[in-house]
Image (spheres, rainbow, N blue to C red):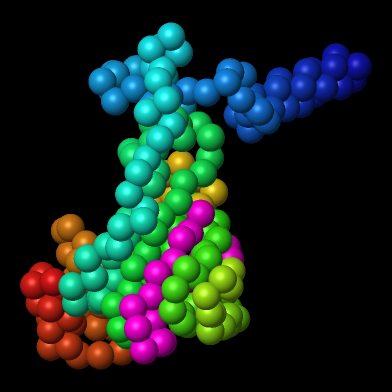
Amino acid sequence: MATSFILFILSVAFCSSILITVLSYEPAPLQDFCVADATNQGTVRVNGMACKNPLFVQADDFYYSGLHVAGDTQNSYGYRISPVSVYQIPGLNTLGLSMMRIDYALWGANPPHKHPRATEILTVLEGTLQVGFITSDPQNRLITKVLQRGDVFVFPVGLVHFQRNMGHTNASAIAALSSQNPGVISITNSIFGSTPPIATEILAQAFQVDNKTVHLIKKKLMHM
């Protein structure tokens, strides 16, 4: 009986050690920085990119210029994203943040989308924006507000959200995100523009429309 109990304790300890190993992580960086080395794609990467030799790091690795320039909003949605992520500033690697400028034409909209790896905090620079996000199932509540210049709004990580220019002039905003590479999933493009495509019958059933409507949406996306 004693032997069985000891074996049980050892088994629990062993499983616990595996669980701790799997779930453990460094709570803080172990070095000053880890500037992304775009020339080194073969190195094993852990939640980031390979590090440049710190002896070769320069000020430009932490620098970006251009967010004062408005993006071209002449597209079907009437908005433009100017990102500043690890791909623009290599020094952001492993630091867990990024930002972007968003420009909106009159009545332009950043359509429903989500960032799988980041919470977003948005500040209106110019204009009037209606913003909002949708809570998870089963409530699916729309949390929305109209923002003016200087107002700030937060979109929680992973939730579908949007912005729309509600004013009589162009609008712009700056957003910060809690990931060096937040990712973006456009709801419309991911559902109706996947490769290979989701079967028309599945989409028709999901949205309670006929096949013709699904084909029309797919066709429009192909020409955007």
Residue 197 visible in the displayed image: yes
Q: Is residue 137 left or right of residue 214?
A: right
Whether residue 189 is situated above or below residue 219 in the rendered picture? above
Q: Position of residue 210 (x, y in %)?
A: 20, 90
- Quick check: is 117 in the magenta stretch? no
| Residue ID at (39%, 81%) | 165
Q: Is residue 188 visible?
A: no
* Vertical relation: 138 (above or below) 173: below
Give the image quarter of residue 30: top right
Q: Residue at x 30, y 83 (%)?
A: 106
Residue 1 drawn at (x, y percent): 89, 20
Image coordinates for residue 205, horizontal then vertical, percent: 29, 83
- Describe residue 1's horizontal placement relative to residue 155 as left or right: right
In reply to whether residue 175 is colored magenta, the answer given is: yes
Q: Residue placed at 86% from the left, 21% from the top?
A: 5
How many numbered circles does the render carry? 0
Percent x, y of residue 167: 40, 87
Q: Residue at x 51, y 54 (%)?
A: 176
Q: Is residue 53 above or below residue 91?
A: above
| Left or right: 114, with 96 as reference point | left
The magenta-colored residue range is 154-176
Q: Nearer the viewer, residue 183 or 2?
A: 183
Find the residue positioned furthest to the right.
2
Q: Nearer the viewer, residue 214 or 18?
A: 214
Query: Which image quarter holds the C terminus?
Result: bottom left
Instruction: Judge whether 128 appears above or below 19 on screen.
Output: below
Asked where in the image residue 77 lies, by quadrant, the reply is bottom left
Q: Residue furthest top?
A: 55
The part of the image, by quadrant, that contains residue 13 is top right
